Image (cartoon, helix red, strand yellow):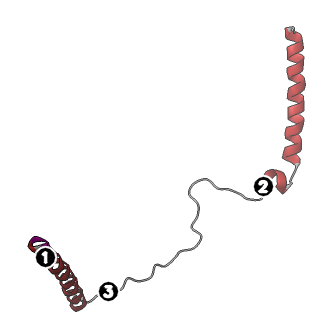
């Protein structure tokens, strides 16, 4: 192909693309352009969600829970000690 033929082919292609661009720009179809408008940046918050208030535990209740936890661990340790003694005796 000579240079003149290439230039003519490019001109035809440019003209065709300009026609397509004009058709798309004039079309107000939502199928082509989309129905949603987007903005730049971070998305807006849909709704503010209020977190439930945290429950407060009294000092007395905390002491009871700590005592119960210590009692559970003491029970586990006693059982382990008994098992070790029984194993040593056997």
Is 38 positioned to the left or the right of 51 in the image?
right
| Res. 73 image quadrant | bottom left
Question: Does the magenta portion include 6?
Answer: no
Q: Which residue is mark 1?
A: 86
Residue 35 spot, x, y in % from top left: 77, 59
Q: Main SS of the magenta segment? A: helix
| Res. 41 image quadrant | bottom right
SS label for mark 2:
loop
Residue occupying the far top of the picture: 2
Which one is nearer the viewer's eye here, 88 or 76?
88
Residue occupying the far front of the picture: 90
Residue at the image point whose x is 90% and y is 36% from the top = 19
Is 23 positioned to the left or the right of 88 in the image?
right
Marker disc for residue 56: 3
SS label for mark 1:
helix
Q: Range of the magenta residues?
A: 83-88
Which one is nearer the viewer's eye here, 30 or 81?
81
Instruction: Give the number of callouts.
Output: 3
Mark 2 crowd level (few <14, some 14–19, many ≥20, 10 Å Cα): few
Q: Which residue is mark 2?
A: 34
């Amino acid at each position: 192909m000579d240079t003149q033929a290439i230039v003519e082919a490019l001109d035809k292609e440019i003209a065709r693309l300009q026609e397509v661009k004009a058709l798309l720009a004039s079309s107000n179809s939502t199928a082509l352009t989309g129905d949603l408008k987007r903005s730049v940046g971070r998305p807006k918050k849909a709704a503010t969600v209020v977190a439930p208030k945290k429950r407060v535990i009294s000092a007395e209740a905390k002491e009871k829970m700590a005592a119960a936890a210590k009692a559970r661990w003491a029970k586990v340790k006693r059982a382990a000690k008994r098992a070790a003694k029984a194993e040593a005796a056997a």
